[in-house]
Amino acid sequence: MTTVTTRTVEYPADGLTMIGHLALPAGASRRPAVLIGPEGPGLNDFQRRRADALAELGYVALAFDLHGGRWFTDPQEMLARVMPLLADPDRMRGIGRAALDVLRAEPRTDSDRIAAIGYGTGGAIALELGRAGVDLRAIGTVNALTTGRPGEATRIRCPVWAGVGSEDPIMPAAQRDAFAAEMQAAGVDWRLAVYGGALHAFHHPPVDHTVLPGVGHHPLHAERAWRDVLALLAECLPVTEGPGLR
């Protein structure tokens, strides 16, 4: 097994001290890097393990924070924080850029080869980085079919992959259609995977507290969505290229 090194990183964003999780692959060479955005409740061990898994594959990976180290267990408290954030693209971009700065500053990062993947709110932030014109090699999202301000999707300069559950009431068919129309009109290289029978946050293991209606784990589709994310990275950000890896 590849040896992975991890550490906590603190950085300012959105008026808070964010606490991210950085995972580094074995070796000393520069590697392609992946920014990982968590779902609305915040950064927890599930997404930290995602970063570790990507480091095992040879990526520098940063799972970024949304709430200054908090992980919300009360859905209403979470919504009170998240809904104003989702309504403010500039705030989302600020959170994403701050994390991206941390990732780029890591000496192991090949700063010309970075992708962003995200889940729920973290996926919306990844998309807003694209709409802001940030140079990314790929954007992958799950449960984050958000649309942006008119015309700004034309700034997206990389392939976009999005996954969603067919029975997700938070991202219903009308939202899927709006997202697809925005990407198509902007000329983005985009793909949308609809996982049959899955609810919102189908990728996340069950939690031991109250969740919002329409949220539920689907183990089979969770594994499929992760494989689809890895396929996106393998296509757009292969670890077999770059300084010291040829």
Image (cartoon, helix red, strand yellow):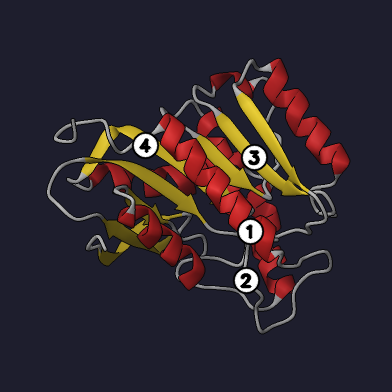
Q: Position of residue 65 (x, y in %)?
A: 46, 61
> What element does badge 4 sit on?
strand
Which residue is painted at 55% across and 41% down in the image?
140
Q: Which mark is residue 114?
A: 4
Amino acid under disc 1: Ala
Q: Is tag 3's residue or tag 1's residue first in the polypeptide sequence?
A: 3
Q: What is the spatial separation of the Cα atoms under label 3 and label 1, in whole angstroms? A: 13 Å
Residue that carries the numbered disc 1 in the rendered image: 222
Q: What is the spatial separation of the Cα atoms under label 4 and label 1, in whole angstroms? A: 24 Å
Amino acid under disc 4: Ile
Amino acid under disc 2: Pro
Q: Residues within 10 Å of mark 4 (few under 14, many from 20)?
A: many
Residue that carries the numbered disc 2 in the rendered image: 205
Residue that carries the numbered disc 3 in the rendered image: 162
> What element does badge 2 sit on?
loop
> Are the residues tagged 1 and 2 within 8 Å (C-beta)?
yes
Q: Position of residue 200 (x, y in %)?
A: 75, 58
> Are the residues tagged 4 and 1 within 8 Å (C-beta)?
no
> Would you say residue 6 is visible in this rendering?
yes
Q: What is the spatial separation of the Cα atoms under label 2 and label 4, in whole angstroms? A: 27 Å
**Most distant residue in the bottom direction:** 208
Q: Position of residue 126 (x, y in %)?
A: 53, 42
Q: Is tag 2's residue or tag 4's residue first in the polypeptide sequence?
A: 4
> What element does badge 1 sit on?
helix
Whether residue 208 sits left or right of residue 210 in the image: it is left
Q: Is tag 1's residue or tag 2's residue first in the polypeptide sequence?
A: 2
Q: Is tag 4's residue or tag 3's residue first in the polypeptide sequence?
A: 4
